[in-house]
């Protein structure tokens, strides 16, 4: 029914055509990552856009090479055909991905100037030589959900999914006239600019927070009203350190209780610093017959293996598996302790050992030296960092709203479900 609605709303002026009849496919050059040089200005040498960079580095649907550098080919003798060098408005599409979401992701290239760049490993390069698409509109063609679904349907594979040039060429695109394409791109670019601006603001706020942590948690910068001497103690002196335990898997009465059961997965997927819920829970009675320990609310749980150093604050009673060391505080502000441990993640990795997996022991954690102020100053420092976190979280929620709004507009404008006014 939804697709029928789209068909009804789309204008008869819109032209249906196959991708292969709109775009020409240029040659891509499959150069491996080890034969590329990253973070080098593209003023000299030949750039190569690797599919991995599209997934990991280029967060926009447009790559502006006036502001972004792409990897350079190491081989000075590399000499691609002149007709394969990218020009402004070319699309680079990923033809292979480890998941369906990554298949067919496309970005538009602009700002080339005199720079020489070619498509790279696992990419298609699409060029509209027939001038059927507006350059600014082009970057959005393969982004809407209708086309994304088509791309995912033609993807083949088991652990890695790929699309062929033959199947891609047969996908039908429904294109509005060029004047309407320009109007649509104006609307979407407005949201893109807002998203980009907000993204930059978030990155700045994160750098500011990182600087605050470096200054305040070390005592390099003191807050007004505090001048007492900091003391150096072992981490084990701020509270009780408790190791995680093994669940009583054979006891049916152990599971589905009211105590949260924490594994490293819950920490790695956590957004923020508080654990409030988990997929599995255990019972109080089941705990008594296992090696697991009940950890009271507002303790610090630290991954001691797998993702070493990842940590969180629990807001409810919990128990953790054997991949954790947990600190039940008695003489330190828990928020302050959380921020302090996040600065020691690399150190925790260095003191870890093991052949199968890295792990640090309870004794290793207890012996770590820390230098801390009195509790009142700890609280004041933690309050500043908490306020910084809240500001960043608020901006990230706003960014999520902007992205959802753009997604809605993208899906509806490019399918014709919503039409733009003649003048903007």
Image (cartoon, rainbow, N blue to C red):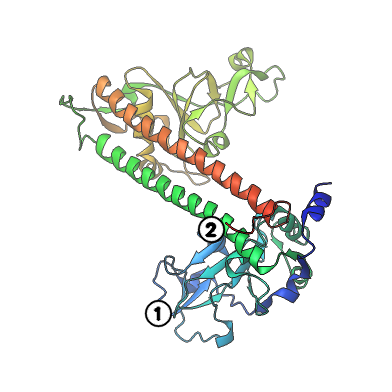
Crowdedness near tag 1: few (<14), some (14–19) or many (≥20) residues, C-alpha within 10 Å? few
In the image, which disc is placed on residue 44?
A: 1
Q: Measured from the top left, where is residue 322 in percent x and y?
A: 53, 30
Above or below — where is 165 with respect to 159?
Answer: below
Seen in the image, is 163 located left or right of residue 246? right
Quadrant location of the C terminus?
bottom right
Question: In this orientation, does residue 310 appear?
Answer: no
Residue for badge 2: 60
Give the number of the mark in front: 1 or 2.
2
- The single residue placed furthest to the front in the displayed view is 423
Above or below — where is 200 with respect to 282?
Answer: below
Instruction: State the residue in front, 358 or 122.
Output: 122
In the image, which disc is placed on residue 278?
A: none
- The single residue placed furthest to the top in the displayed view is 285
Q: Measured from the top left, where is residue 326 in percent x and y?
A: 45, 26
Instruction: State the residue in front, 212 or 248.
Output: 212
Image-quadrant location for residue 106: bottom right
Instruction: State the residue in front, 319 or 162.
Output: 162
Residue appearing at x 51%, y 60% in the figure: 58
Seen in the image, is 263 located left or right of residue 155? left
Task: Measure the C-alpha gap from mark 1 to mark 2.
Answer: 24 Å
């Amino acid at each position: 029914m939804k697709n029928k609605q789209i068909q009804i709303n789309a204008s008869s002026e819109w032209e249906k055509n196959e991708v292969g009849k709109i775009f020409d496919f240029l040659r891509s050059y499959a150069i491996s990552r080890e034969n590329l040089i990253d973070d080098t200005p593209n003023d000299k040498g030949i750039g190569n856009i690797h599919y991995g960079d599209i997934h990991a580095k280029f967060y926009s649907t447009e790559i502006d090479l006036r502001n972004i550098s792409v990897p350079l080919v190491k081989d000075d003798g590399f000499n691609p055909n002149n007709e394969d060098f990218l020009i402004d408005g070319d699309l680079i599409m990923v033809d292979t991905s480890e998941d369906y979401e990554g298949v067919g992701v496309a970005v538009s290239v602009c700002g080339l100037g005199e720079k020489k760049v070619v498509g790279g490993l696992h990419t298609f390069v699409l060029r509209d030589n027939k001038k059927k698409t507006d350059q600014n509109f082009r970057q959005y063609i393969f982004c809407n959900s209708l086309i994304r679904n088509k791309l995912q349907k033609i993807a083949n594979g088991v652990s890695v999914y790929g699309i062929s040039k033959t199947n891609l060429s047969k996908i039908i695109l429904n294109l509005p006239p060029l004047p309407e394409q320009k109007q649509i791109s104006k609307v979407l670019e407005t949201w893109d600019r807002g998203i980009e601006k907000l993204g930059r603001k978030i990155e700045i706020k994160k750098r500011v927070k990182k600087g605050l942590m470096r200054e305040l948690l070390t005592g390099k910068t003191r807050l007004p009203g505090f001048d007492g001497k900091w003391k150096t103690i072992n981490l084990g002196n701020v509270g009780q350190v408790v190791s995680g335990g093994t669940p009583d898997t054979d006891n049916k009465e152990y599971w589905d209780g009211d105590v949260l059961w924490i594994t490293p997965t819950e920490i790695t997927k956590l957004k923020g610093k508080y654990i409030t819920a988990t997929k599995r829970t255990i019972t109080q009675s089941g705990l008594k017959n296992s090696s697991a320990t009940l950890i009271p609310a507002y303790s610090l749980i630290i991954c001691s293996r797998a993702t070493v150093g990842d940590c969180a604050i629990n807001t409810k009673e919990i128990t953790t598996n054997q991949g954790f060391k947990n600190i039940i505080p008695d003489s330190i502000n828990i928020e302050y302790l959380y921020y302090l441990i996040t600065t020691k993640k690399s150190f925790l990795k260095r003191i870890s050992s093991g052949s199968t997996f890295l792990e640090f022991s309870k004794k290793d954690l207890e012996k770590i030296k820390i230098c801390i102020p009195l509790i009142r100053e700890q609280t004041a420092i933690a309050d500043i960092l908490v306020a910084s976190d809240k500001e960043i979280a608020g901006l990230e929620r706003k960014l999520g709203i902007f992205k959802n709004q753009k997604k809605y507009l993208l899906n509806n404008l490019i399918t014709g479900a919503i039409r733009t006014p003649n003048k903007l």
